[in-house]
Amino acid sequence: MQKYRIILFLILSVLGATNASCQKTDKPNVLFITIDDMNDWTSVFDENNPIKTPNIEKLADRGVFFNKAYCSSPACNPSRSSVMTGTRPHKTGIYGNSSDWRGALPKIKTIQRYFKDNGYFVCGAGKVFHHHKDWAFHDNASFNEFLMMSINEPYPDKKLNGLDWYGSRNTDWGAWPEDIKKTADYRTAQYAIQKLNQKFDRPFFLNVGIYKPHSPFFAPQEFFDKYPSKNVVMPQIPEEDMEDLPEGARKLVEPTNWFWDGMVKAQKEDPDAYKDYVQGYQACASFADEMIGKIINALDNSPYKDNTIIVLWSDHGFHLGEKQHFEKFALWEKTTHIPFIIITPGLTQSSTIIEKPVDMTSIYPTLCELCGLEIPKHADGFSLVPLLKDTSTVIPPALMTYGKGNHAIRTERWRYIHYADGTEELYDHKNDPKEWTNVAGKKEYKGVIEKLKTYIPKKNAEQVPDL
């Protein structure tokens, strides 16, 4: 018996070594990190920015950081649907948070399903697809395994900010809960850590959906302590900033005007309301950063460190009062500018910054090429692999869409916005990085507009029905 035990041990040892070496020689793994509502006021863009994200900074230093990356659409559902299917909103008609993305694209394989069908073990937790109607938009067929849970931790008995009349239960902010283990993002991070400690006999595609800094702005007290109330940095909002906005811009943001108007009212009740709101966002951003740090640390301590592609992106930006606007749902820089990082062992060089604007339709084809998979014909974007290999590669500008016929074009210098009613905005980021002056009406910029207008889609799909 002892002889057979030794033989069995040797056989299992060989099989174990084979499985371990498989991760070195087979297709690379993918760690796919999605953050909700993370804007560009973080230290990964500029060390002087008030929101400190040291873990995302460290991650950017390990690979390629795109400092001019943009969402396909500044709303959760159209943005995420665009990334997961590789399609553009103006071609699909998926414009809103209630648009039935799967009904619009019944035969399109998500990137998760495509990798699953090509031999990957696809798993995940957190907010990956939009959480509309209690996860009605989640695509079960895309995963071998997914941890379904409520992304909102249990709410306090009453609103922490005391503004019961203001918006919904999500229009709230404050230190909550006391136990970090009760938060959804902590549980998501723990799921990812567990998976990275697991043995796989095939390549994996691990999806991590970090919900914060999405509202309500709840995070444990330790994260609020990073931003003492007396030191909170507030957005700059020139009084005249709204004066040069065209009718198209005003109409697009009209449905969310209640949010800014409500804050004006709230400050009469509580003078610190606006400051506390901004503090809450900053605390939640740092909370998200810490969860990401825990996940990356787990990867670094796993056997998969040297054979795992890391992609980190946010579904859109976020206004904290700039242009008297809160949240997303607009086509300005603050609404659409996002963190985007790619790390590919053996290809990307550390501390690489790419200045060329890119949008997130590039994720699907890029991951396909990096993992040796054929890029599906339905993908509207292009692979960034040539750009990763040579940062001088010429690419078209980034395109953003929100609602039928409303588009923004971003080059290294210009942001051009063309609304469905024909009105326009043009911002010169060389001289006006905060987009305070719309120069679209000045004749000296006519040539710039004519050139940028060639990238505006000529056809726009009708909006798909809501679910």
Image (cartoon, grey):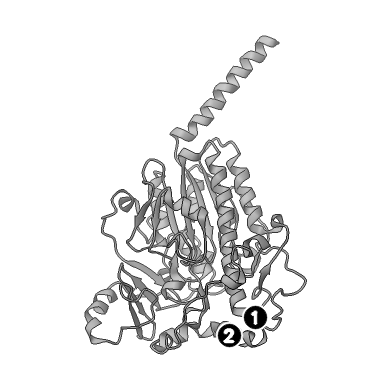
Characterize the local packing of mark 1: few (<14), some (14-19) or many (20 or more) Cα atoms within 10 angstroms.
few
| Residue 90 vertical position relative to residue 350 in the rendered view, above or below | below
Q: Which residue is mark 1?
A: 167
The amino acid type of the residue labelled 2 equals Trp
Give the image location of residue 173, x and y in percent. 65, 72
Could you tell me which residue is drawn at 40 percent across and 75 percent down? Answer: 434
Could you tell me which residue is drawn at 54 percent across and 82 percent down? Answer: 256
Q: Tell me the CA gap for discs 2 and 1.
A: 8 Å
Query: The C terminus appears in which quarter of the rendering?
Result: bottom right
Q: Quadrant of residue 209?
A: bottom right
| Residue 421 vertical position relative to residue 16 in the rendered view, above or below | below
Q: Is residue 123 visible?
A: no
The amino acid type of the residue labelled 1 equals Gly
Give the image location of residue 389, x and y in percent. 31, 48
Give the image location of residue 309, x and y in percent. 45, 46
Helix, strand or loop at mark 2: helix
| Residue 224 vertical position relative to residue 272 in the rendered view, above or below | above
Could you tell me which residue is drawn at 40 percent across and 55 percent down? Answer: 65
Q: Which residue is mark 2?
A: 258
Q: Quadrant of residue 15?
A: top right
Q: Is residue 291 visible?
A: yes
